[in-house]
Every structure is written in structure tokens, then in C-alpha cells.
Image (cartoon, rainbow, N blue to C red):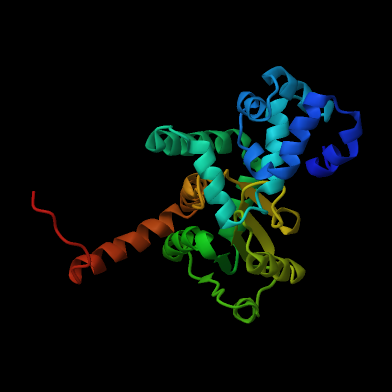
Amino acid sequence: MGRDILTVIQEKMHTFSKGQRKIAGFILDSYDKAAFMTASRLGKRVGVSESTVVRFAFELGYDGYPDMQRSLQKMIRNRLTTVQRIEVTKDRLGGQDLLSMVLQSDIDKIRITLEELDRESFERAVDAIVSARKIYIIGVRSSAAIASFLHFYFNLIFDSVVLVSANTSSEIFESLLRVGEEDVVIGVSFPRYSSRTVQAISFARDRGATTVAITDSEASPLAPISSYSLMARSDMVSFVDSLVAPLSLVNALLVAVSQRRNDELARTFHTLEEIWEEYGVYEKVPE
């Protein structure tokens, strides 16, 4: 279904039964909460049976309630404010074991990422990175952690890697001033998507660079402007963005790239080990 689910509900409101109108009204008023409720919980909330909720999803044209729920979650992913995220989290957690829920949620995200990742896009992205003249990496706000991690290790593997300064839009364009067809620009962004990262990838694409997006779904604004899109699940648990699956994807990217540069990397680390030893970079742990 391509259209906004709220628009579809409003258009079909006159065709719904009394029970379905209750569901529709609640979703229209509180879609941020409805998106994370089970069919049973949503039914109890509005006073209808679980089966009525499931039939409502079919009535809207979905394959079932989980399909409708995914559509709602995709729609709101970039709409929720931080305050709304906190409210949704409180509603979702209830009296559950918080530690177990969060860790299990992250495990599920890695599993789904593994199942859904486009292997061909991954391999082509690796090829492009390995053969690039220069690699630029950009990620702001919470995604800056992923970008910085990737830059740290790429800087050990490649001669020319730039972590794009993104404090202002002008700094982005200044950092990318000489980007061209032989370069690769990697953009990292997850909901709520950063406009500065989107601008950077768009700028690089217009100048012929190969663009690689590390993001969460085809709905991401980075997807249509990137040569290759590497998708990792990053659904919110609270106002905090879960970066476990994205970091795991980046780990895989680093390993794949290092395998292509194995001989050079071995020489680099041999030299580094000598430097680290000479200057006491690491503390020696007593045996």
C-alpha cells in the first residue's frame, strides 16, 4: 500500500462498522501509540474484540494486522518528537522486564537485518569503497557515533578518508568541495533523519560520486539518492535510537573491506604495533 494509512482510514470511514469506527478513531487520534500495540491490546483499548481489529486491517487492504502495524510504524518513524517517544515507551513497557525487553529487541533487529539485507548491494558497496580514490563519511547527531567508528578503522585501512564536519551546512559543502566521480561518500542516518546528511549525499551524487547509504529502510530519504543502500533495523526503544544492528552491519563492512586489503593491512598493523610498543600506547596487563 503506497498511500498514507491515515488518509486511507479517513477516506473509508463511512464504510466502517461501529466497532471499526472506534478503531479508526483511536488510530487517527493516537497513531503514535496504536503503532506499537498488539491487536489484542488495541481491541481492549477501544472496546472491541481482537478479531474485529484483525478484520479492520484486512478491510484497509493489508495482509493482516502485523502488515498494518508495520505501515503505521513506518509512517510515524520520522514524525515522532522526543516527547512522544517517551510517552510511547512508557505505554509499551508497562510492567515488563525492561532489561530483557531491550536486549531481546536488539537481538531481533540484528536477526531481521541479516534476513533482509541485500547481499548484492553490500558486495557492490565493498567493491566501490575498496577502489575509491577518496572516501568521505558523514553522520550527525546519534549517527555520528557510527560514522566516527567507521572512520577510525577505515583510516587504518585506507590512505585518504575524511570524516565530514557537519556542524553547519556550509561546512558540509566545504568538506565535499572536491568530491568527484572516483570518490565514495558514505552517509549514515536513521530516524529522525538528518537533513544535513541528506544534503551531503545529494551534493555528492550530483557531482558523480558513488554514494552509499547506511540507513533503516527504503522509506529513508537517503535511499533514492544513493548508489547502494545498506539497511539495518533501528526501531526506537525509547527516545534513544538503537544502533546495535547498524553497528553490526558496519562491523561486517569493515571485515569485508579488510579482507580485500589483507596484505597491506597486515603491513600497516605490523608498523603500528612497533609504534604502540615504543611509545607505550597500551597498558601492559600483568600475567
Residue most extreme to the left? 287
Q: Which residue occupies the foreground of this view, 37 or 221? A: 37
The answer to whether 163 appears left or right of 21 in the picture is left
- At a point 76% along the width and 55% down the height, the residue shown is 224
Please report the residue visible at 62 percent of the width from the left and 64 percent of the height from the top.
185
Q: Nearer the viewer, residue 274 or 100?
A: 100
Q: Is residue 31 visible?
A: yes
Residue 203: give x, y in percent of width and height: 72, 71
> Residue 18 sits in which quadrant?
top right
**Going by the image, does 145 lie left or right of 11?**
left
Residue 263 point in image, percent of width and height: 42, 55
Vertical placement of residue 55 versus 170, above or below: above
Total label count? 0
The residue closer to the viewer here, 165 or 76, is 76
Instruction: Identify the image quadrant of residue 9.
Output: top right
Position above or below: 5 against 219: above
Q: Residue at x 56, y 50 (%)?
A: 85
Q: Position of residue 95 (x, y in %)?
A: 43, 33
Asked whether residue 62 is in view, the answer is: no
Q: Quadrant of residue 98?
A: top left
Q: Residue at x 55, y 76 (%)?
A: 167
State the image coordinates of residue 264 (x, y, percent, origin top left). Answer: 42, 59
For the N terminus, give its image quadrant: top right
On screen, residue 279 above or below 24: below
